[in-house]
Amino acid sequence: MNHAAQQGHQLNPYAIALCAAGRWIASRHWVPATGGNFSIRSGQHSALVTASGKDKGELSPQDLLPVSWPDGELLCPGKPSAETALHVRLYQLDESIKAVLHTHSVQATVFSRLIQTEQHVFNGYEMQKAIRGQLSHDTHCPLTVFDNTQDIPALAAGVATRWQQVQTASALLVRGHGLYVWGQSLEEAKRHLEAWEFLIHCELERIRLTGLV
Ligand SMILES: CSC[C@@H](O)[C@@H](O)C(=O)COP(=O)(O)O
Ligand SMILES: [Zn+2]
């Protein structure tokens, strides 16, 4: 990258905000060992996505790679996240999504393996109100769980097929893998991430204490 391009990258407010989010997420121990990836929408058909294999707590703006899908087909220079196709599919499914955060916390990973069904319904938690559209603790908020695969385009296609049920949560789980959340701003995606980590932690404790999944 030449000097001018590098400077442009360093001044990019989207890139700076995502690097700061990465430091916050890493401080919560939700992205160990280079796990996780993040993106932020930069245009109708474009986003910045974390480069693959980076420590997500030590990102600098040049680790955010521009990807685009002007005609639906993915164009990505360099080596963006191995899970870029899922980020892009989420942006395609809902134009209001502005940021996507993927994490590998211990509790989300363990919880996803305890849930044998395609969905786990959360009910009765005040924290549900931190999720877009959830107006009360008394609603039923379903979190959809997908089986893990290394075939990310296939996973993205599965998410698209079940989008009606997935979108309510602004989040999804991949079994034995981790959590995806999104939001209409980076701040909202961070709030969804913190809320889901809290809700999953509560359910994990409930299951531990009662033995009832
Ligand atoms: C620690 S391996 C984790 C990866 O396989 C993947 O799931 C992940 O979240 C990070 O991949 P990346 O390509 O760096 O975005
Ligand atoms: Zn992952």
Image: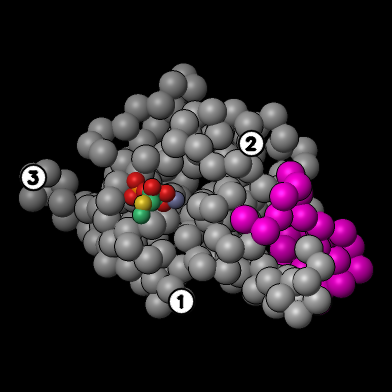
Amino acid type, callout 2: Val
Tell me which numbered mark, 3 or 2, is placed earlier along the sequence. 3
- The label shown at residue 28 is 1
Q: CA distance from mark 3 to mark 1?
A: 35 Å
Q: Residue at x 59, y 49 (%)?
A: 175
User: Is disc 2 surrounded by few (<14), some (14 to 19) or many (20+) residues within 10 Å?
Assistant: many
Quarter residue 29 falls in: bottom left
Front residue of 89 and 121: 121
Residue 69 occupies which quadrant of the picture? top left
Q: Which residue is mark 2?
A: 159
Residue corresponding to mark 3:
2
Q: Write the start and end of the magenta stretch as one range.
A: 113-141
Is residue 16 visible from the viewing direction of this image? Answer: no
Instruction: Name the outermost residue toward the left.
Output: 3
Residue 120 in the image: above or below residue 95: below
- Of all residues shown, which one is farthest toward the bottom? 209
Could you tell me residue 200's position as x and y percent?
67, 68
Q: Viewed as shown, does residue 139 lie left or right of 73?
A: right
